[in-house]
Amino acid sequence: MKIKEIYIHIPFCVRKCGYCDFLSFQYNEETSEKYIDCLCNEILHAEIEDTEISTVFIGGGTPSVLGERDIERIMMTVSEHFLLSDDAEITIEVNPGTVTENKAKLYKQIGINRVSIGMQSSDDEMLKKLGRIHNKKQFLECYGRLRKAGIANLNVDVMSGLPGLTLEKYEETLKMVCELGPEHISAYSLIIEENTPFFELYNPDNGKKVSELPDEELERRQYERTGEILSMNGYHRYEISNYAKKGYECRHNTGYWRGVPYYGFGLGASSYIDGIRYSNVSLLDDYLKAGGIAKDTDSIIRLSKNDKMEEFMYLGLRMTEGISRKQFKNLFNEDIDDVFGKVINKYSALDLIMCEDDKIFLSERGIDVSNYIFSDFLM
Amino acid sequence: MADISRDKIRNFCIIAHIDHGKSTLADRIIEKTGTLTNREMQAQVLDNMELERERGITIKSQAVRIVYQAKDGEEYIFNLIDTPGHVDFNYEVSRSLAACDGAILVVDAAQGVEAQTLANVYLAMDHDLDVLPVINKIDLPSADPERVIEEIEDVIGIEAHDAPLISAKNGLNIEDVLEKIVTNIPAPSGDPEAPLQALIFDSLYDPYKGVIVFCRVKNGTVRPGMNVKMMATGAVENVVEVGYFGAGRFIACDELSAGMVGYITASIKNVKETTVGDTITDADHPCAEALPGYKKVNSMVYCGLYPADSAKYEDLRDALEKLQLNDASLNYEPETSIALGFGFRCGFLGLLHLEIIQERLEREYNLDLVTTAPGVIYKVYKTDGTMVELTNPSNLPDPSEIDYMEEPVVSAEVMVTTEFIGPIMELCQERRGRYLGMEYIESSRALLKYELPLNEIIYDFFDALKSRSRGYASFDYEMKGYEKSDLVKLDILINKEEVDALSFIVFAGSAYERGRKMCEKLKQEIPRQLFEIPIQAAVGSKVIARETVKAMRKDVLAKCYGGDISRKKKLLEKQKEGKKRMRQVGNVEIPQKAFMSVLKLDED
């Protein structure tokens, strides 16, 4: 398959949030300058194929901490080196506290047509607890600036399961977002990751402050309300944590779940090219020293046919539309029932996997326990 | 070596209550006599097994020959045989004692005489051994040798006034002990010219030499080339090598004559030809009669051992066969369980013995095991007048066929400081103990005597005893016999299906309590699954306790983008591994450790 997607990682933030385990550091101009030199160098050294790139995603960290010049430079480099299709989806992730009017205008100017806003909650107290740098007012300003600048495809991130989050407050957040009407909403349940301040504070195993996290009942209720409220407002769930108005599903992310090859540029970024998955090094110094050409050799995994078939299942089934039997046959020249029939039957008997004509997908209950199901697809 | 005179040989063992310093004294004796250089010396030389060193206990008897230059100017040969201290291993002790002429009794200068001190001394006296008391740990601040000497004289009734006062740890006064061995332990008797009579007290399998037989020659002489006969099995073998025990190695010699302790090899491949306790004699000039063997010990505790990976069944059988050679008190026979597949019902001397065997199988033979709840042997008297010995609860006949049942009862002695008499009596009452009496050993300590059903002490009685006496109580028991009892079979149903491996026999009056605890414990051990799982305890068709493992509500990774895919796969692999360690019972996955959790029901 041809490479159609590009991911660009910006590992800088104004400040790291308490729950975040992504690769990012505190922003400073000097380091970021060097970083962008390396990043552009890496992009320019990528082997190109004679296909059009259909999605670019600038993620982080917080790409919006970068100055206008920097973002422009990155986009220029990409479009000089690669052939972007006319209708390419070009996304940038932003923190509401860092988007000035000028930045918003610039994004539009340089071809960015989708902005993903890390709002998380509309409750200021909650935002403080999460360690976010913005408040509700700043989010609304940011949202308005982006719309005014003409960005017609916006995503807003919201989080449930937060410490101290009541059902009422969570519903307020959802309702406020729905009133604004972004094209796309990502709704995540908080995951307490290791090596984060939240892990120290809330990890159930160290017995501290656990009570602040919603209990299972409340956490599940918030999760259920997400689906209910969003669907009432015209958003359909197309993946475990993603909701969109019709036609606005994120093409870039959908590519990941469909096994589309992609380039990943920047610190720690992952690529999937010619059946090989690998990442760049994740130590900033190493990346800078190597001028951006720094694969982490330990991360290289050449996928076997079995690996690819497994991924086809456990990534594809993340999407509510599921997977296609025909496509499986086309890709692997094998009948899906010959390979996974036993697992499919086991879970369809429990109404966790549904089969309709060509399609195989998870039921709502199946999505809730998807890891349990997916692990059975490993051969 | 052939011309050692018998009066220069001393065959002895060291007996003691656990932790009184038996192995440390053995180390010092070996060190002082220069059997090993300091560099070869490793703490607790005789505890060969990794497990013995780790737990600080002796499981297997070990022997070593030592040469000692005594103050009378003569050279003496000491054969030191180390013995286990724990009551579960009394059988091993008994075997070793038969090879000795005397015993050093080590008593802790602070703790004094304990239950196992008594038990071991009585064993030694049964074997007509002379007992040489030694007071150890006199370096402890709490040491009170005067009191302990008095105690030995009063309680045991042996002369202790000139007992060496030593610190084995610091190497203090070890020479006194060595001299006393020369003067107080008798030289072996026996006639080297008489027909051969040698007692097998242990054996070991060596892949090159075949079975290595440990023996004590009582009469006659054994040399390589001789044809010897095992009197019990009738097997005749040609002796290839004889020798004695260096520290940690075998040293070949020309002959073993009356009074000597050593080993024989004869290319014996079949383990079953040499049973411990048998007498070896000269096939051409046999002795008139065999030496009195050991009373065959009967297993007291039974449980099922299953390989975690069912493909390892054959490996488990081989391992058990090899262990049995070295541990005659282990019994096993094949059995099958619906839940666990193919395995073995194994008999042990006690719970510690069970644990030790389990650990040895896991470590020395690299096996992953699932153990079922231990039980004792019940006698089931049926209405048709027959009696069945029940070792596996699943084989209990239908209640309509049962007239009555009997369970094994032990006589137990608990030595305890007076402040803990109350809590210990309470514990014994809880465990259906019948109070027999109490003797004050001195003003601060007492010996409590109880009759206890064996099935009440095989689980966690030791632990409970220790925790209720802050470690000060010590305990010993011996089988008394069988008594009629009101017993029922408690079944566990998981998702409405009976799990045979979790069934056990219990006193009817305790069924409710145990059933409830089992359900609670299993609830903790069984992870949530896709559906709700009822866990029930039942006697017959009557459910007496119930818990529910709620259905799993959420097992989902919210985010999975480009950079997460490799990590996600690792998580799923881990999850899959976890599933592999489960046993499928019906459509419920039960972790293997759940089957063992029932061992520890009384932990809070």
Image (spheres, rainbow, N blue to C red):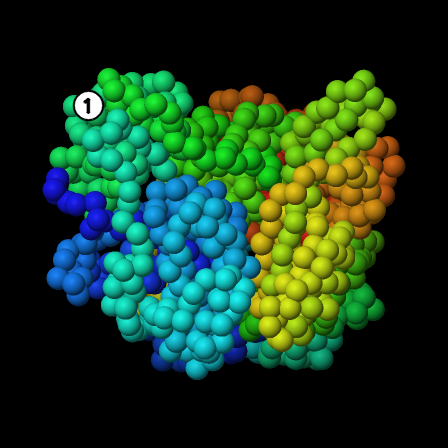
Location of residue B512 in the rendering, given as x and y in whole percent from the top left corner: 83, 47
* Mark 1 crowd level (few <14, some 14–19, many ≥20, 10 Å Cα): some
Residue on which disc 1 sits: B226
- In the image, is A286 to the left or to the right of A55? left
Q: In which quarter of the image is the N terminus of chain A?
A: top left
Residue shown at the point (78%, 54%) measured from the top left: A224
Q: In which quarter of the image is residue B232?
A: top left
Q: In which quarter of the image is residue B218?
A: top left
- Between A204 and B567, the one lying in front of the other is A204
Residue shown at the point (51%, 69%) measured from the top left: B151
- Between B172 and B574, the one lying in front of the other is B172
Location of residue A250 in the rendering, given as x and y in whole percent from the top left corner: 60, 51
At mark 1, the secondary structure is: loop
Residue shown at the point (15%, 55%) measured from the top left: B75
- Between B192 and B589, the one lying in front of the other is B192
- The answer to whether residue B197 of the structure is visible from this angle is yes
- Between B63 and B121, the one lying in front of the other is B121
- The answer to whether residue A1 of the structure is visible from this angle is no
Mark 1: amino acid: Met
Location of residue B548 in the rendering, given as x and y in whole percent from the top left corner: 79, 47
Q: In this view, does B34 lie above or below B482?
A: below
Q: Quadrant of residue A131?
A: bottom right
